Image (cartoon, helix red, strand yellow):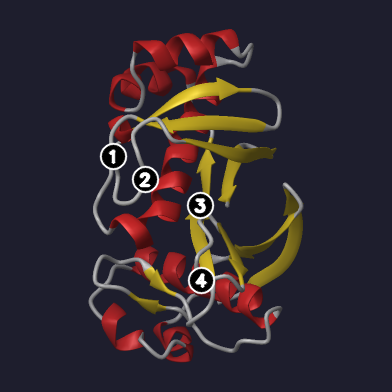
């Protein structure tokens, strides 16, 4: 599969960015993955997204002098090498990954296409509550962009917390309390593993063409 690797900085952290062409994908491309057998019955999109994400992860790990390809966990989450924390995301024909040599770090990254205004209003009740809607409205950003940021930030938070919490977290598990031109703050609405209700998390965000990228590193 044809792909291009670049990097960019988000909140002073290097994000490895893969742009790929899914039309050039062949099943033989998966043989590069040690766990390729687990993808045998997956659909074509799942295969291309997964491959692009692991390519991004491999680049992130190579900067840490590690040649491991993250395996697939029981819940579908990537299994990072001992002593390393990281996160992977993919959206459309892009994939991104970040990794750090700190097994206790909380790292979550997510990329989302900016919602259409009509779609944002259709799905908002599944993503935010009325208090959050007020916060987003006061940010000054178009509602569709603000809701996409809220959606993406919650995904990043849940990815970061999953290794500690080990359970699925719905969008109602965290609430947007602040949104400005560089960061978004989420607070837990309930206890989650070792993290107490009300604990705040600050995520960085950036708009890349028609997408947003959110990142939590603690």
Q: Earlier in the sequence, mark 1 or mark 4?
A: 4
Answer left or right for 195 relative to 84. left
Answer left or right for 176 relative to 12. left
Label pair 1/2, CB-CB below 8 angstroms:
yes
Label pair 3/4, CB-CB below 8 angstroms:
no
Q: Can you tell which mark lies on residue 120?
A: none
Any part of residue 213 in sight:
yes
Q: Which one is in front, 89 or 135?
A: 135
Q: Where is residue 82 shown, x and y percent of the image?
A: 48, 82
- Residue linked to disc 2: 195
Q: Give me the residue at 67% from left, 82% from top.
A: 62
Residues at marks 3 and 4, CA–CA distance in whole angstroms = 29 Å
| Quadrant including the N terminus | bottom right
Which quarter of the picture shows residue 41?
A: bottom left
Q: Earlier in the sequence, mark 1 or mark 3?
A: 3
Which quarter of the picture shows residue 170?
A: top left
- Residue linked to disc 1: 191
- Residue linked to disc 3: 92
Mark whose residue sits in front, 1 or 3: 1
Query: The residue tagged with tag 2: helix, strand or loop?
Result: loop
Q: Where is residue 181 shown, x and y percent of the image?
A: 70, 26
Q: Where is residue 115 shown, x and y percent of the image?
A: 48, 29
Residues at marks 1 and 3, CA–CA distance in whole angstroms = 33 Å
Q: Earlier in the sequence, mark 3 or mark 4?
A: 3
- Residue linked to disc 4: 103
Any part of residue 115 in sight:
no
Q: Earlier in the sequence, mark 4 or mark 2?
A: 4
Q: Which one is in front, 50 or 69?
A: 69
Residues at marks 1 and 2, CA–CA distance in whole angstroms = 6 Å
Q: Earlier in the sequence, mark 2 or mark 3?
A: 3
Query: The residue tagged with tag 4: helix, strand or loop?
Result: loop
């Amino acid at each position: 599969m044809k792909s291009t690797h670049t990097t960019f900085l988000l909140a002073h952290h290097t994000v490895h960015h893969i742009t790929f062409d899914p039309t050039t994908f062949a099943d033989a491309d998966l043989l590069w993955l040690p766990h390729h057998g687990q993808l045998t019955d997956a659909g074509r999109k799942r295969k291309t997204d997964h491959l692009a994400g692991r390519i991004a992860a491999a680049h992130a790990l190579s900067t840490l002098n590690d040649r491991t390809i993250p395996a697939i966990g029981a819940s579908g989450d990537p299994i990072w090498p001992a002593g390393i924390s990281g996160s992977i995301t993919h959206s459309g024909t892009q994939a991104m990954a970040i990794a750090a040599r700190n097994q206790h770090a909380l790292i979550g990254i997510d990329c989302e296409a900016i919602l259409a205004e009509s779609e944002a209003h259709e799905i908002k009740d599944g993503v935010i509550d009325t208090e959050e809607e007020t916060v987003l409205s006061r940010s000054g950003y178009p509602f569709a962009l603000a809701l996409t940021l809220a959606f993406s930030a919650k995904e990043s938070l849940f990815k970061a917390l999953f290794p500690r919490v080990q359970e699925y977290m719905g969008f109602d598990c965290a609430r947007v309390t602040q949104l400005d031109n560089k960061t978004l703050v989420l607070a837990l609405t309930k206890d989650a593993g070792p993290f107490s209700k009300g604990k705040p998390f600050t995520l960085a965000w950036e708009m890349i063409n028609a997408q947003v990228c959110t990142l939590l590193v603690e």
